[in-house]
Image (cartoon, coloured by chain):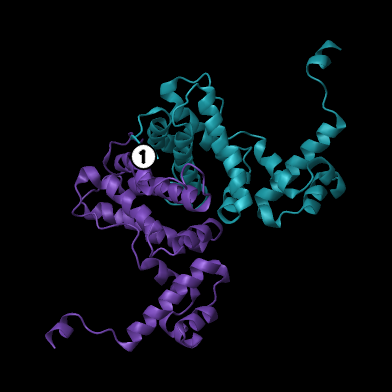
Chain colours: A purple, B cyan
Amino acid sequence: VAINELTPTPTKSDRTRAAILRAAREQFGQHGYDRASIRAIAAQASVDPALVIRYFTNKESLFSAVVDIDLLVPDLTNVAPSTLGRRLTEHFLARWEGELSDGVLVVLLRSAATNPAAAERLRGVFVDQVIEGLRALGLSDDVERRATLVSSQLLGIALTRYILRLPGIADRPAAELVADVAPTIQRYLTGRLPAVRIR
Amino acid sequence: VAINELTPTPTKSDRTRAAILRAAREQFGQHGYDRASIRAIAAQASVDPALVIRYFTNKESLFSAVVDIDLLVPDLTNVAPSTLGRRLTEHFLARWEGELSDGVLVVLLRSAATNPAAAERLRGVFVDQVIEGLRALGLSDDVERRATLVSSQLLGIALTRYILRLPGIADRPAAELVADVAPTIQRYLTGRLPAVRIR
């Protein structure tokens, strides 16, 4: 059938892979990285643990696969330059609060606070994405500096809202936070930054 | 002697207390909150563990005493309003990087990421201080909102610079970071914030 050539039916192996990822997402979200086990993930996905290893090699790769599913940074190429800060902030909060997040991002941030490998992973899934996003927009000056400033504010929001649960941040509607924080992100992305001595 | 009436000689008990705090600061910084022990702190201070308990009741109170020694928020009462953002950001970074910090703040933030009691403590030593600082300046509108926005940016800097050690944040001189971030803090402290619907 013509339509099947365009959108092929998922194979059995696609379905198995998806079931493992769903189970992993739930187990990591519920028990944290250290206490989640390949055995429990396999049991929840109703597959043999050996199959989990065949698909994902080890727990660390499986975790990366779970976190990479949904990008933290949206495609910014068709966004008006003056609304980049708002768009990025909205997307960031939506990703942590959307039904897809399932606490996995909180697990990632928590793990990153105590585990250098997780910190490295968080850098990969977030900072590098912001850098790529800026480059895709044709921005090239101070790209790393801007991306890390953006990260400091957005990850600071994640820390205070989802981990520390500070009253005044944790209990405000996302739209209000976006309004307060978007001008900061906009300045970091496209504003004029102070001159820095060449080192 | 007259001078002794004004600046009394430290008593033996003051000295013991200071020795315990010094040892605790070092043990917490080196081993983290969970793995630091009253026994090891007492040994390093050359006192009996029972004496540590008599002075500080338990490990949690001792930890609070260590962290409370140096306030994270400076006295802002004589600071020109237009330089509040810079002053607060400078002080914050200096506290984490100064010789007095000894890694205790990093331990506090790390513990707060995984432990609700530590998160509560961080709120006490930081957010409440910013709120008090704003009130001392006679500012009264949106004080909690402003203080938590400041916290989200400054704790985000601490997270990305000292914990995640993101290149582009961790390896820049503090003065450069202050220049980039101070306008954000200034806006959160004294700028016009978006109107919020009354709920």
Residue A109 screen position, x and y as percent? 48, 57
Q: Nearer the viewer, residue B158 or B81?
A: B81
Subunit that carries the residue with mark 1: A
For residue B4, side relative to residue A4 (left or right)? right
Q: Nearer the viewer, residue A56 or B116?
A: B116
Residue B48 shows up from this direction: no
Residue B58 screen position, x and y as percent? 77, 48
Residue A121 occupies quadrant? bottom left
Query: Going 50% across and 58% down the picture, which residue do you hit?
Result: A112
Residue B20 shows up from this direction: yes
For residue B136, side relative to residue B57 (left or right)? left
Query: Going 43% across and 24% down the picture, which residue do you hit?
Result: B83
Mark 1 crowdedness (10 Å alpha carbons): few <14, some 14-19, many ≥20: many
Query: Going 73% across and 41% down the picture, which residue do you hit?
Result: B22
Q: In this view, which residue lies farthest toward the left?
A: A2
Where the N terminus of chain A falls, by quadrant?
bottom left
Residue corresponding to mark 1: A180
Query: Going 24% across and 45% down the picture, which residue do you hit?
Result: A83
Q: Where A36 sits versus A11, above or below?
A: above
Residue A20 screen position, x and y as percent? 43, 79
Q: Nearer the viewer, residue A163 or B23?
A: A163
Amino acid at the residue labelled 1: Asp
Residue A124 occupies quadrant? bottom left
Disc 1, SS:
helix
Q: In this view, which residue lies farthest toward the front?
A: B199
Residue B156 screen position, x and y as percent? 46, 46
